[in-house]
Amino acid sequence: MSAFIEDNAPVIVQGMTGHQGMTHTLRMLKAGTNIVGGVNPRKAGTTVLFEGAHDGEDVHIPVYATCAEAKEATGAKASVVFVPPRFAKDAVVEAIEAGIELIVVITEGIPVNDSAYFVELALSRGVRIVGPNCPGLMTLGESEHARGVNLGIIPDGIVSRGPLGLVSKSGTLTYQMMAELSDIGFTACLGAGGDPIVGTMLREALQEFEQDDDTKAVIMIGEIGGKAEQEAAQWAHDHMTKPVVAYIAGFTAPEGKQMGHAGAIISGGKGTAQDKKEALEAVGIPVGKTPSEAARLMREVLAQLS
Amino acid sequence: MDLYEYQARELLQEAGIPTPEAIYARNVEEVVEALPSMGLPAVIKGQAKIGHRGQAGAVRLVRTVEEAKAAAEHILPMSIQGHEINGVLVAQAKDIRNEYYVSISVDRSTRSFCVLATSQGGTEVEQIAQEQPDAVKRLHISKLEDFDQAAALDMAAQIGFEDADVAQAGDILYRMWQCFTTNDATLVEINPLANVADEDGNLTLCALDAKVSLDGNAAFRHDGWQRFTDTRVADTLEARAQAAGMHYVHLDGQVGVIGNGAGLVMSSIDAVTFAGRAQGNGISAANFLDIGGGASAEAMCRSLETVLADPKVESVFINVYGGITSCEQVALGILQAIEELGVSKPLVVRFDGNAASEGLRILRESKLDTVHVAETMEQAATQAVSLAASVLHNTEETK
């Protein structure tokens, strides 16, 4: 059992037949993810060939008309969404209604009015959403027989299983940090996403890692904007037994400018990296001002654990 | 995307929220033309996308045409903290009895929409919230529930618009929510929502000032927000890059920064500024530019072109951690840019991840002495800063 989702869990891909969907479904299959179907009403009943996708063997993935059909036929537990922004809300709502337990939304550029709706709907149904605007979720399975899942676009092969959990608001910084700590290894790496409203906030990822026996410490990557880092830190201080180390991006970012991510903006003097660093340190969470400093702090924390 | 007050006012009007009579004027002549239909006294309000315009002297009450002209002549050339005034709003002056503050915004923490209200409008709501937390009401609207007239009236009663017509306050709240959702706003703020008296002493609520921010991600549903395009800034480097689909933010330093992924680019900008501080030369990042995931050689080439269009840039730091992006493609894009654009400024490249070794090999084999390769992000930032500093130093000496 890994954090967030069971090993070998069956997974469907919404938007699989598009360019992004095809590229990343092949990658996810090669990483060992148990992908059992795609969803596209216009291509229902067909199959899609992914050459050499599973240990060098070709894989044919069936396409279903709806999430409900796909779930009925395959028992899918999770869905990865690559649907373009204008159709994303309907796609996620469909997955929630079909009873999919974990929905990873990779799509960037979804209007916040839409994500607010599907995130609230998911919360009311006890469904976990990861994202939107995130690199996805990767778990590292316990063994060859209990393979982890790679849901989204996190590159396979950077890390292997180890005692760390990772949660991040950014994609490439996730990979950077995975690489910095690759010798130690991870149970799971979760990209929470860079939008103002996300299905799994930093705090909720910490909750999950706290409950996962194999995770011994968590590295958290935040950035300017909002106060999700402070909320996570307060929760960690009040409830967590495991150490957390953080990195925050954007110490030198200017006020009032959106730095790429829809949520990465300092407004009215609020949401600065320095404020976040101070708030985290006040509750005992060490914060690096660069990714490599955070990685070094994590090594120090781990040394004290053993 | 933030709107000017006069644009926000348009959206409130469309939603049926009472606002004072007002005309937007771009110059003194238009101000004078607007006056007869407004009557005197009137208020001349400088338009800029920043708060505290009153304190900055950009809002004036005028009683005569002469005063109106003088106010316009004073306000139009102003800029407030770097924000140029873009025209003025000539508005009817109102007999104000009380002022309230009401806003609807996206609430990241509760993942719903927050209604913030206080009977002490007209000033900074954050300040009131700090000094008298009980004076500010914080309520929520869920996307799953239908926020109808009855719900809005109920909320208005909870907020307690003393001295005002609660039924009208409820109607305004309902219309604010309509304005928020139909326009895909992230903020609709009325401050002050004033209780004003007419000639007979009857009191009604009226939105005297408003701030609206729109969700850039929803532009596809609103014809690209063309009606709100700011022609004044349309020709800046930033506007041109954004029109070409790039995530580019101008920052005014000397080291251009290009990377893949918003977080990594922010991190790279930090690294450059930290290196500038460590070297004591005050060098900092010139821009933020995220080439996104899976960028092609062509996209990389165009990115370099954009960054180098800024005349202050003396060196460029290219930081790529290849996930979907192939460092090989990025390397080819760099060489393409050097050839096509005749780039002579030094470039410092740091690659890791997908096809990093292929990318580095391509750069090494090019044998270009303007292309430097660094092992880590910090080393690359330090080198880019030193290179920019030495160019600037040499220029100083030649002078």
Image (cartoon, coloured by chain):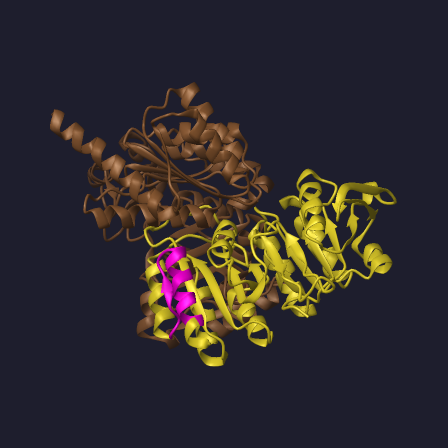
Chain colours: A yellow, B brown
For this rendering, which residue is in front, B63 or B77?
Answer: B77
Q: Position of residue B163 (x, y in %)?
A: 40, 70
Q: Position of residue A154 (x, y in %)?
A: 59, 51
Does the segment drawn in magenta span residue B239?
Answer: no
Above or below, A9 against B280 in this view is below
Q: Quadrant of the N terminus of chain B?
A: top left
Q: Residue at x 88, y 45 (%)?
A: A45
For this rendering, which residue is in front, B221 or A14?
Answer: A14
Does the segment drawn in magenta span residue A289?
Answer: yes
Q: Residue at x 29, y 34 (%)?
A: B32
Q: Quadrant of the C terminus of chain B?
A: top left
Q: Position of residue A99 (x, y in %)?
A: 76, 64
Which residues fall within the magenta stretch? Answer: A284-302
- Classified by dominant secondary structure, the portion drawn in magenta counts as helix
Q: Give the quadrant of residue B40.
A: top left
Tell whether B87 sits left or right of A122. left
Q: Position of residue A27 (x, y in %)?
A: 67, 46
